[in-house]
Amino acid sequence: MVPPSVLVPQTHQGPHTKFTDAQPTTQGKVELADWDQFHFAPIRESTVSRAMTKRYFADLDKYTESDVVIIGAGSAGLSAAFVLAKNRPDLKIAIIEASVSPGGGCWLGGQLFSALVARKPADVFLNELGVEYEDEGNYVVVKHAALFMSTLMSKVLQFPNVKLFNATAVEDLITREDEQGLRVAGVVTNWTLVALNHDTQSCMDPNTINCDVVLSTTGHDGPFGAFSAKRMAQIYDSKAKLGGMRGLDMNHAEDAIVKGTREVVPGMVIAGMELAEVDGSNRMGPTFGAMMLSGVKAAESVLNALDTRHRQNLGGYGGKQSV
Ligand code: AHZ
């Protein structure tokens, strides 16, 4: 038996204490400590609260001026976040996700089936992520959609310049009227539980995040979906009319979403299935290549929009204090 001291520290030596140094025996079996003697390092309950809240509030403070806000942590939003965060460690990227569990609709491939289908050339993105697949010629198949999503999410969340605020809904946009016209300048947020219950809650007032570019990837219309498309159709009379997503046509839909990914109005890039509501393009159903590559193109559009903002000197990279 491995002596208890290997697994259970006799003295608690702070964050570097190793709890899991159990060694394989010569028979190849890992033996653990004497469980009768097992205990965790002591802690006071308020310490746990402070460990969470001081970080959360520091992040709220830090990201209340972001470079980029991504609305929606589905396959399109997280694909864009991956490319942006990887290539531009200097950018502060806040991701706002209404659901407690990020990932959008990408935990299953379609209906209740596990596998994820992606048409080529989206295999390039899977290679970049390091997700394995079966090559079927014109398309590839990942064994579990959840494998794709969990890999993508774990990579995105490890970037030091990314903060995910989940259980938080974007319920309006910050807009600015200046010489260049009307532009999107940030988002208005609330706890999703409040956003869903405005008719019953007495506390209605939201929070805000200013940023140079918003990337909206809230999916097609639904209780939360197509949020920015719907809001912009109200704010901008002609520029961002709701086209209404059309019926399913995989071949047209995927090309249209990737080609259409762009800065739809100044300061607002739209990607993923939300775009089908803006442009009136088809849906593609259970094939995810367009979500990945729309995310990649969205990252490029966001960087172009940031450059434009920088050139206009309206608060770009360094001018966070200007309104
Ligand atoms: O919770 C939503 C989801 O995780 C989130 N979201 C929506 N409105 C929000 C708001 N504030 C914050 N107001 C919000 N978050 O946005 C995420 C959208 O993810 P998704 O997976 O639904 O969209 P996507 O465009 O990334 O992927 C679409 C996948 C689809 S749908 C489809 C079809 O129906 O034909 N085909 C594909 C591949």
Image (cartoon, rainbow, N blue to C red):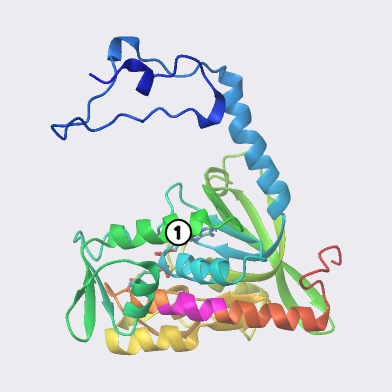
For residue 35, above or below residue 317:
above
> Is residue 161 something that shows in the picture?
yes
Q: Which residue sits at x=71%, y=51%? A: 62
Front-lying residue, 230 or 109: 109
Residue matched to label 1: 155
Q: Quadrant of residue 64?
A: bottom right
104 displayed left or right of 90: left
Residue 186 locus on image (x, y percent): 69, 64
Secondary structure of the residue carrying numbered label 1? helix
Q: Position of residue 220 (x, y in %)?
A: 42, 70
Q: How many marks?
A: 1
Q: Is mark 1 within 8 Å of ligand 1?
A: no
Please name whichever residue, 248 or 300, is drawn nearer the observer in this view of the structure. 300
Left-right relation of 89 to 21: right
Dominant secondary structure of the magenta stretch? helix
In the foreground, 197 or 181: 181
* Residue 82 against residue 23 in the figure, above or below: below
- Tell me which residue sits at (25%, 65%) in the image: 109
Q: Residue at horizontal 57%, vertical 64%?
A: 70
Image quadrant of ligand 1? bottom left
Residue sticking out furthest to the front: 26
Which residues, given as a range, are shown in magenta? 293-299
Position of the C terminus by quadrant = bottom right
- Give the quadrant of residue 172: bottom right
Q: Tell me the kind of residue under disc 1.
A: Lys
Q: Nearer the viewer, residue 139 or 32?
A: 32
* 252 sits to left or right of 15: left
User: Outermost residue, left direction?
Assistant: 27
Rate crowding at label 1 as few (under 14), some (14 to 19) or many (20 or more) other CA atoms within 10 Å. some
Question: Is residue 294 on the magenta stretch?
Answer: yes
**How far from the left and from the top, in percent, is residue 317?**
76, 71
Which quadrant would residue 310 be assigned to in this image? Answer: bottom right
